[in-house]
Amino acid sequence: MEEKIEQIAGWLMTTERWVVFTGAGLSTESGIPDFRSPGGLWDRYNPQDFDFQNFISSQASRVKYWEMATEMYEPMKQAQPNLAHLAIAEMERLGKLDCIITQNIDGLHFKAGNSAEKVIEIHGTAMHVSCLHCQKRYNRDAIQARIKEGVKAPTCDDCGGPLKPATISFGQPMPEMETQEAYSRSSRCDLFMVIGSSLVVHPAASMPLIAKQSGAKLLIINRDPTPYDDMADIVIHGQAGPTMGNILKKLKQG
Ligand SMILES: [Zn+2]
């Protein structure tokens, strides 16, 4: 382990353009429940209510969706960045971080201090709400306040359209601009670091492959094995927070 950490620190010193790719592992280490895990939130709701087409076509689905989304939002709002988030924020200050591509919707990279232009949220964000008709964006807390007052499925002030958290639901297309940007940056980096993602949700999961094929070094830090472990230059199966903390410490020691 010590050897791997030293090697990663060495590569961070000798490479110039880093892309960091983060997933659910980072969020769970900050205490946000994994909704997909058995016994998780998703077991108590009908997945069909969270399909995008149903959200558009059925008021009952929208009500159910907001019920679940409200339950999901509380722990997200309370969560604080962990050592891995803080290490990634430090990587930005070191000046070689091209971008963070994140599957997470919890806004923790911003809480850790990363700047907006460095973070590509390919699955959207739970911190905002948008109107599905006119795309007007709202602060999430402002809309949650309406729910608290008894509104079941909030609508847009301007056009009356349905409001939905600005996350990407099942059956909803990926945000085109963000996805393109993420692909393009993956192909231009010389170091691609996967932190806390099992790399199973597509198309995001193919980004490390593109980086590797374009000549970047590929590092994977994840609790469990991933389908890309075989092609990675270094794999660490462990917790993101302590591992990233050690890598940054080593990097600063030179
Ligand atoms: Zn609207």
Image (cartoon, rainbow, N blue to C red):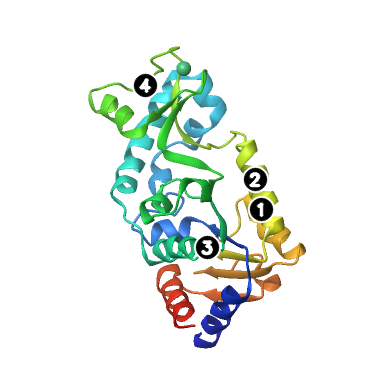
Q: Position of residue 81 (x, y in %)?
A: 35, 58
Q: Amino acid at mark 1?
A: Arg
* Mark 3 → mark 1, Cα distance in angstroms: 16 Å
> Badges 4 and 1: C-beta atoms under 8 Å apart?
no
Q: Mark 1 and mark 2 in contact (Cβ < 8 Å)?
A: yes
- Residue 62 vertical position relative to residue 140 in the rendered view, above or below: above
Q: Quadrant location of residue 64?
A: top left
Q: Which residue is mark 1?
A: 185
Report if the CB atoms under discs 3 and 1 are less than 8 Å apart: no
Tag of residue 181: 2
Work out whether mark 2 precedes mark 3 in sequence or the reverse, and give the earlier one: 3
The residue that disc 4 covers is 154
Closer mark to the observer between disc 2 and disc 4: 2
On the image, numbered disc 3 is attached to which residue?
A: 95
| Alpha-carbon span between mark 4 and mark 3 | 42 Å
Quadrant in the picture for residue 30? bottom left
Q: Amino acid at mark 2?
A: Glu
Q: Earlier in the sequence, mark 3 or mark 1?
A: 3
Relative depth, front residue between 178 and 63 = 178
| Residue found 54% across the figure and 87% down from its top | 3
Q: Are marks 4 and 3 in contact (CB under 8 Å)?
A: no
- The CA distance from mark 2 to mark 4 is 31 Å
Looking at the rendered structure, the secondary structure element under dot 2 is helix
